[in-house]
Image: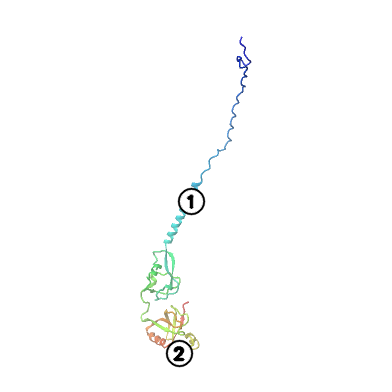
Amino acid sequence: MTSTNDNGAPPSSGGWKPSGPTVTARPAPAMPPPPANVRAPSTPRDRKPALAALGLLLVLVGALASVYIQQQAKNRVGVVEIVKLVPQGKSITADDVSELMVAADPTISYVTWDQAQAGALRGYTARTDLVAGTLLVGQMLTTELPLAPGQEVVGLSLKDGQYPVGIQVGDTVSAYYVSNKNDDKTGQQYLMDGFSTQPIVANVRVYDVGQAGTSGDIDISLVLDQQYANDITQAASGTNLVLVFDKHTQ
C-alpha cells in the first residue's frame, strides 16, 4: 500500500515539499468617475498669429492715413497774398506779396505762387487799390496805364525837408511853392508857422517812392494833370517845392 503525504503527493526521496501558499486574487480598484461639468485641461493656444494680425492692421491703417494726407495736400495750392497796400496803377513787387496755401478751387482764378515766381506778374499793374490780406486773382490786374485823359506821371528829386516823413505809395499830397528861407524846417513845419498860400495842386496821388539816400534826398513820382506838370517840376528843380499830406496811408 502506497502511502501519501499530507498534501496528497507521493513521498519521494527528496523529502517533503510544502505546497505553495494559496492566495486569493483581489479585484482591481474601480476608477472614480470624473466630476460633473469639469473639462479636461487643454493645450494653451498660441497667441502669435493674433498679434501678427493686429500688427498688419495697424500698418494698413497707417498707410491709409498717409494716402489721405497726401490727397488732402494735393487739393491745396500756394497762391499770392497781398501783404501791404498796392495802389491802383502800381506794379506788384516781391515785397508786396507772400505765399498762402488755400483749397484749390477751379472757379477762382487765383494767381498762383509758382506763376508769380516765374515772373508772370511782369508788365501788370493793380487795376484798383489792393489792400493787405487780399488774395490776388487775375481780375485785379491790368496792362493798361490807369491814368485819366490828360494825366501823366511826373518824377521829382526832392531833398530832406521838401516831403513829409513817412511818405509812401498811395498817399495823397498837396504841392506848395515856398521860398528858400525855410532850409532849417520841413515843409510841414514851414506851413504850420503861419506861412499860407494856395497850393500849386492838391490831392495829388503818390505813384512811387524811391529809397532815401544818406543825405535824405529821395525820388518821388506823382500822378498829375498835365497843366500842373510844368509848375511842379520848376519848383522842384529850384528846391522851392514842398509836399504836405492830404491823406496818409497807414
Residue type (three-letter) at the residue carrying disc 2: Asn
For the residues labelled 1 and 2, the Cα–Cα distance comes to: 87 Å
> In the rendering, which numbered label is found on residue 19?
none
Q: Image quadrant of residue 224?
A: bottom left
Which residue ends up furthest to the front in the rendered image? 13
Q: Residue at x 42, y 66 (%)?
A: 78
Q: Earlier in the sequence, mark 1 or mark 2?
A: 1
Q: Report the colour scheme.
A: rainbow
Residue 3 placement (x, y as % from top left) = 62, 12
Q: Residue at x 45, y 90 (%)?
A: 180
- Judging depth in this view, the residue of 34 and 12 nearest the camera is 12
Residue type (three-letter) at the residue carrying disc 1: Gly
Q: Quadrant of the N terminus?
A: top right
Regarding residue 112, the answer to whether it shows in the image is no
Residue assigned mark 1:
55
Q: In the rendered picture of this protein, how many numbered marks are placed on residues?
A: 2
In the depicted structure, whether residue 54 falls above or below residue 193: above
- Judging depth in this view, the residue of 169 and 248 nearest the camera is 169
Mark 2, Cα crowd under 10 Å, few <14 / some 14-19 / many 20+, is few
- Judging depth in this view, the residue of 249 and 216 nearest the camera is 216
In the depicted structure, whether residue 250 falls above or below residue 102: below
Residue 194 placement (x, y as % from top left) = 50, 88
> In the rendering, which numbered label is found on residue 180?
2
Residue 80 placement (x, y as % from top left) = 42, 69
Regarding residue 139, the answer to whether it shows in the image is yes
Residue 148 placement (x, y as % from top left) = 37, 79
Mark 1, Cα crowd under 10 Å, few <14 / some 14-19 / many 20+, is few
Q: Image quadrant of residue 13?
A: top right
Which residue ends up furthest to the top in the rendered image? 1
